[in-house]
Image (spheres, helix red, strand yellow):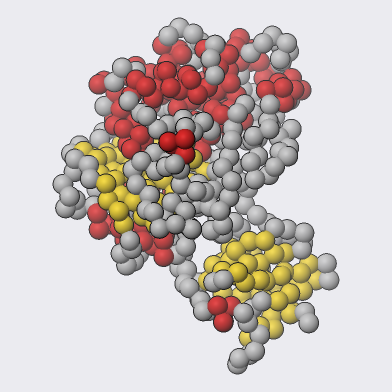
């Protein structure tokens, strides 16, 4: 028996659901841009960010809006649960799989420079001893890696981190080559869309080989320096580190930063709202930029995918015909979640960066880009309330579902945690005084209590079933 956890990673697909909702204003710090200070968007952004903060979905948020009139940025919450400093446009966050957009742009620029063709096979770039020349892996093209049509799985089977809290740090080039040399593709390259962190990381590495430089130097020389972006990198200077927001997991606990080396192209970059709104402006008006040809190349739709199309890194469209022009990507690491999107026709864009592992940030980003596009953009999130710790104490205990499966409930301050036999401890969030939901798994627990005594029954709701567990002495 197991409480089935959602799969993790440095990126995720997105499902768009619109519904109504409202919330009270929370603390906010504004960064003035060239939009009027009385921007009509402020109240909407305030209310929606407040819902995430009041519901304890995120510790801190930084938001950037791009319109034909200019830029406005906002900060909410805290850069660290232990401090009172509010994030702003210059706060540094891990951006996870948004890195893949930069990797796609590197490919487009390498193609413009004549270093590698978009349809060049992988075997042309990697050392000849890496993979057999006649293997299907060797026939994967650069563009297939960028469009997630390579046939490679989401992650390599030999990714076995010594430290699960920093899962990519010790994955070496030798590990990658050993995997490629023995892996048999389940389908022919180009057959279908299948999101792959491995493919994004492999593309970054192949471009290092073709460009005769390391990934972060290529990003700096070919992208961030030409575009005037000063706070987008992998390694942090001391000055950038002083602006780094601390990451938090879905339970709200601080976690370690992730370090991607060999697979840096999949999700290794850190950045700021200030840099990313500038990046979106360059994508909205590429003709004004020194790398305009490469930028335009990345935005071209190349393959179909569920709900839309994909370019070189950019996902195009959500699931509605009115969203077909939107280019977007999201990203997630152990302690951060990010979302960027722009509409080249409406000339608007959105950046949302959070220092919490909270995929619900995507929903905020979708609502804001559609707000700027004057499309339906209502926003609601599952309810979460704060419960008196004395009430939580009534739920603390051990509840037996079957002899070999016990759920242990504990309290830490005003937070309640549940740990099933053989699994990690996860925080559960109150929907009301008796019912709590997980955020790392699609499940809820509910307590049955007497008049004033401790709970006697825990009910696990998951997968359409409700299972009762009796309290142990």
Tell me what residue is drawn at x 59 percent, y 32 percent. Answer: 260
Measuring from the top left, give residue 33's x and y in whole percent. Answer: 22, 42
Instruction: Answer with the quarter of the image where residue 463 lies.
Output: bottom right
Measured along the vertical axis of the image, is residue 379 above or below residue 353? below
Measuring from the top left, give residue 230's x and y in whole percent. Answer: 37, 29
Q: Hey, which residue is sitting farthest front in the picture? A: 238
Measured along the vertical axis of the image, is residue 257 above or below residue 169? below
Q: Is residue 174 left or right of residue 365?
A: right
Tell me what residue is drawn at x 39 percent, y 62 percent. Answer: 51
Measuring from the top left, give residue 112's x and y in whole percent. Answer: 41, 11
Q: Quadrant where the C terminus lies?
A: bottom right
Instruction: Answer with the quarter of the image where residue 150 lies.
Output: top right
Residue 299 in sight here: yes
Tell me what residue is drawn at x 54 percent, y 67 percent. Answer: 429
Q: Nearer the viewer, residue 19 or 322?
A: 19
Q: Is residue 286 left or right of residue 157?
A: left
Measured along the vertical axis of the image, is residue 100 above or below residue 205? below
Q: Quadrant where the N terminus lies?
A: bottom right
């Amino acid at each position: 028996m197991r409480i089935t956890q959602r799969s993790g990673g440095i990126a995720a697909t997105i499902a768009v659901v619109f519904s109504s909702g409202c919330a009270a204003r929370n603390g906010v710090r504004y960064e003035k841009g060239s939009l009027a200070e009385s921007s009509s968007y402020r109240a909407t952004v305030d209310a929606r960010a407040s819902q995430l903060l009041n519901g304890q979905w995120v510790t801190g948020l930084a938001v950037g809006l791009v319109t034909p009139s200019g830029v406005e940025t906002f900060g909410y919450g805290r850069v660290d649960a232990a401090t009172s400093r509010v994030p702003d446009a210059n706060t540094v966050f891990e951006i996870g799989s948004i890195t893949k957009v930069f990797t796609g742009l590197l490919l487009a620029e390498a193609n413009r420079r004549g270093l590698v063709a978009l349809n060049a096979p992988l075997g042309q770039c990697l050392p000849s001893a890496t993979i057999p020349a006649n293997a299907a892996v060797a026939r994967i093209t650069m563009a297939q890696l960028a469009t997630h049509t390579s046939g490679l799985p989401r992650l390599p089977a030999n990714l076995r981190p010594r430290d699960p809290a920093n899962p990519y740090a010790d994955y070496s080039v030798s590990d990658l080559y050993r995997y490629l040399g023995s892996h048999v593709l389940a389908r022919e390259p180009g057959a279908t869309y299948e999101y792959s962190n491995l493919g994004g990381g492999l593309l970054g590495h192949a471009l290092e080989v073709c460009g005769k430089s390391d990934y972060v130097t290529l990003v700096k020389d070919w992208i961030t320096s030409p575009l005037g972006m000063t706070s987008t990198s992998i390694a942090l200077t001391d000055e950038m580190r002083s602006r780094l927001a601390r990451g938090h997991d879905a339970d709200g606990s601080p976690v370690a930063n992730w370090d991607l080396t060999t697979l840096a192209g999949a999700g290794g970059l850190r950045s700021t709202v200030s840099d990313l709104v500038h990046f979106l402006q360059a994508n909205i008006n590429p003709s004004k930029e020194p790398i305009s040809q490469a930028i335009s190349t990345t935005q071209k739709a190349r393959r179909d995918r569920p709900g839309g199309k994909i370019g070189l890194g950019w996902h195009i469209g959500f699931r509605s015909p009115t969203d077909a022009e939107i280019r977007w990507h999201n990203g997630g690491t152990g302690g951060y979640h990010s979302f960027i999107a722009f509409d080249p026709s409406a000339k608007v864009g959105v950046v949302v960066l959070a220092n919490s592992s909270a995929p619900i940030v995507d929903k905020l980003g979708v609502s804001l880009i559609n707000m700027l596009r004057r499309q339906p953009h209502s926003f609601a999130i599952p309810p979460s309330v704060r419960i008196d710790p004395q009430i939580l104490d009534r739920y603390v205990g051990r509840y037996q579902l079957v002899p070999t499966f016990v759920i242990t409930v504990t309290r830490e301050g005003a937070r309640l945690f549940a740990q099933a036999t053989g699994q990690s401890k996860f925080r559960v969030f109150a929907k009301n005084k008796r019912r709590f939901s997980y955020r790392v798994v699609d499940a809820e627990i509910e307590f049955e209590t007497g008049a004033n005594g401790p709970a006697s029954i825990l009910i696990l709701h998951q997968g359409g079933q409700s299972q009762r567990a009796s309290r142990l002495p």
